[in-house]
Image: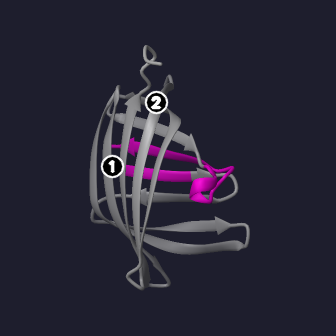
Amino acid sequence: MKMKDVIISIKGTQNDADGEDSEIELVTDGQFSFENGEGVFSYMESELTGLEGTKTSFTISPLGVVLSREGSLNSSMIFEKGRKHEFVYETPYGSTTMGVDTKKLSVDFNEHGGDMEIEYVVDFQHAVVGYNQFRINVSEQNKGSV
């Protein structure tokens, strides 16, 4: 698959077990490819997200979405509506197994980019630790503009 330069806009909301909301908005350059109903986009995390030195990739398929992180933090999360998946969360301090239960998954992509919305619950040892939501837009970089 040939990758192209894109602008990736991410709005994330995390609601922790204490009911505290934290929001993050990120607009960054990235790479994107889409072919035969499957796509991938990736970008480098920054200081803003606290994951500097980590490459984040989203792989889109008819089955669901996989979020992979490689670098200072390594993890892979599978988002599949109505199914719960476990994932290993690795940090510099050690690793642990957590669960992700996808409540909403809306994906609308073509070769020019698209939109995705994911709502999911994260649990650790069967206790909910957060309710998270991602809204992501991927759009082609306009080469003609300044």
For marks 1 and 2, the one nearer the N-term is 2
Could you tell me the amino acid type at mark 2? Val
Q: Can you see residue 62?
A: no
Coordinates of residue 131 in the picture (x, y in percent)? 37, 72
Q: Give me the C-alpha separation between circle 1 and circle 2.
A: 24 Å
Q: Is residue 55 magenta?
A: yes
- Direction top: furthest residue: 144
**Camera-side residue: 6 or 3?**
6
Q: Is residue 72 magenta?
A: no
Could you tell me the amino acid type at mark 1? Leu
User: Around disc 2, counting alpha carbons within 10 Å, would you say few (fewer than 14), some (14 to 19), or many (20 or more)?
Assistant: many
Q: Residue at position x 46%, y 46% from top?
A: 58
Q: Which residue is mark 2?
A: 6
Q: Residue at position x 51%, y 26% from top?
A: 3
User: Which range of residues does the magenta coloring cover?
Assistant: 46-68
Determine whether, in the image, residue 40 is placed left or right of residue 101: right
- Direction right: furthest residue: 92
Q: Residue at position x 52%, y 35% from top?
A: 30
* Residue 37 sits in quarter: top left
